[in-house]
Amino acid sequence: MSKKLKLGIFGFGVVGQGLHDIIRTKALNFEIVKFAIKDASKKRTLPAELFTTDKNEILNNAEINTIVELINDPVAAFDIVKRALTSGKNVVSASKKMIADNLEELIYLQKQHGTSLLYEGSVCGSIPIIRNLEEYYDNELLHSISGIFNGSSNYILSKVYNEGLDYDTALKQAQDLGFAETDPTSDVGGFDAKYKLVIASAHAYGVVVKPEDVLNIGIQTLSAYDLQYAKEKRLKIKLVPVAKELDDQHVAMFVLPRFVNSDHFLYNVDNEYNGVVVQAAFADQQFFFGKGAGGHPTGSAVLSDIAALRYDYQYEYKKAHEKKDLKFTNDIELNVYVRYEDESLIEALAFDYIHERFYSGNFRFVIGTIKLKNLIANQSRISAEGAFVACTGDLKEIKLHVLTDLATEVL
Ligand code: HSE
C-alpha cells in the first residue's frame, strides 16, 4: 500500500528546482512541506513560506517523514542525512561525494535504525543504474562496469573534439548550463566520476572502498597534441571510470581518460550524456545511455527514489552480504599512452613494456604496459608537468599483478 510522503527538501539549486518542476506536473501521493535553503536573500519562484534557512525546522518536524537532500556541501549533507536516518526519516540524496566518503557508515545507520537511503540521482543522472545493479544483476557475476559517469567533462571533451572549441570556453559552457560542480576540478579531475564509481561498485561487487584509495586522473592536461593523435587514429578521448573483477578475490577500480574507437558503445556518447557498459557473465555486454547532468534528468532519478519510498523500498546491498572474499586492489597492470615533456617522467613510471615511442618537436609520447601503482606514485608529478595519460586497448587486457609483487617481496 502506497504511503503518503511529507517531504522536507534541502536545496533549491539546479536539481531541487528540476525536481519541483517535475513534481508540480504530477498527481502523486506526496507533498512538499518545506525547502531548506542557505541564502534567504535570493529571489525564489515559489512563495516565501515554503522556505526556511533553519535545518532544524525540517529535521525536528515530526510531520515530515521523508528528507530529500540536494545540497552541494558534503559535510553539511552528511550531518543532515545522518540525523534524518537516525530519527526515523527515510532519505533520498544526490550527493555523490558525501555518499562515497561515508558509505560504510550510511549502510550501518540504515540497518541500525531501519530507515532507507536511496541515491539513484547521485550516479549518472537519469540512468537507473543503481537499482539495476541492486535488483536486476543481484545474481549475475559482473566482469566489469565502466562508462562515462561525468557529464561536464564529457561535454568539454565533445566540444573540443567535435567543434574545435577551446577547453576553457567549453568548461564555461558546462558551468553555465548547470552541469558542473561548484568546484569544476571535481568534474575535470575525475573525482566526481570516482565517487560515482565507488557507489556503483558497492552494489555491483559488494566492495565498499574509500575514494582516496582509488586513482583518478582527469582531462585537465589535455593538449592539441593529444587531440591530434586521437584524430589521426580516428579515436575519441573519453574520461572512463572502470571497476573490473580480476578473479574471484580481486576487484580493481580507477578513473582515467581512454581512447575509444568507433565500434565502442561510448564513442557516440557526447555532451552531457552518460553511458554505462556492464559486462556480465551471462547477460554479456549491456549498455545504458542517458543524460548524466542537469536539473530535469537528475530530478527524474530523485523522483523515482521518492516514489519508491512510498512502498518503503530499501537497498539490501545484496552482494555485500554474500559470503565473498572479493577485495579491492591496485595491483594491476594496464596499457597507457603518456604524452610528456621530461624524459625522466617516463623513467619514473618504469613501464614494464614499451610498445611505441614517438618524438617530434615538443610532441613526445610513449605507449606501453605499466603498473597502476606507478601511476599512483607519480600522480602529482604527471599533473604538475602537464603530462596526459590515457588508457589504450581493451578492458580484457587489464591484469592482476599480485604474483610479480609477491615475487619482489620474497627477493
Ligand atoms: N557535475 C556532475 C556532472 C553533475 O557533470 O556529471 C551530475 O552528477
Image: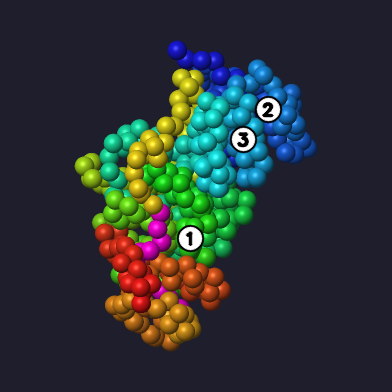
Whether residue 102 appears in this view of the structure is yes
Left or right: 280 with respect to 103?
Answer: left
**Which of the two marks, 1 or 3, is nearer to us in this view?**
3
Helix, strand or loop at mark 3: helix
Per the picture, the main secondary structure of the magenta-coloured stretch is strand
Residue sitting at 38 percent across and 72 percent down?
409
Residue highlighted by disc 3? 82
Q: Return the x and y of residue 155 as percentages of the image width and height.
A: 47, 54
Helix, strand or loop at mark 1: strand
Q: Which residues are magenta?
A: 328-340
Q: Examine the image and state in which quarter residue 406 appears.
A: bottom left
Q: Examine the image and state in which quarter residue 38 appears.
A: top right
Q: Return the x and y of residue 205 as percentages of the image width and height.
A: 37, 45
The residue carrying pointer 1 sits among few (fewer than 14), some (14 to 19) or many (20 or more) residues within 10 Å by Cα, namely many
Report the Cα–Cα distance between label 2 and label 3: 11 Å
Residue sitting at 52 percent across and 25 percent down?
114
Residue highlighted by disc 2? 59
In this orientation, which residue lies closer to the viewer: 249 or 170?
Answer: 249
Of the numbered discs in the image, which one, if any, rests on residue 216? Answer: 1
Residue sitting at 74 percent across and 23 percent down?
49
| Most distant residue in the top direction | 1
Q: Quadrant of the C terminus?
A: bottom left
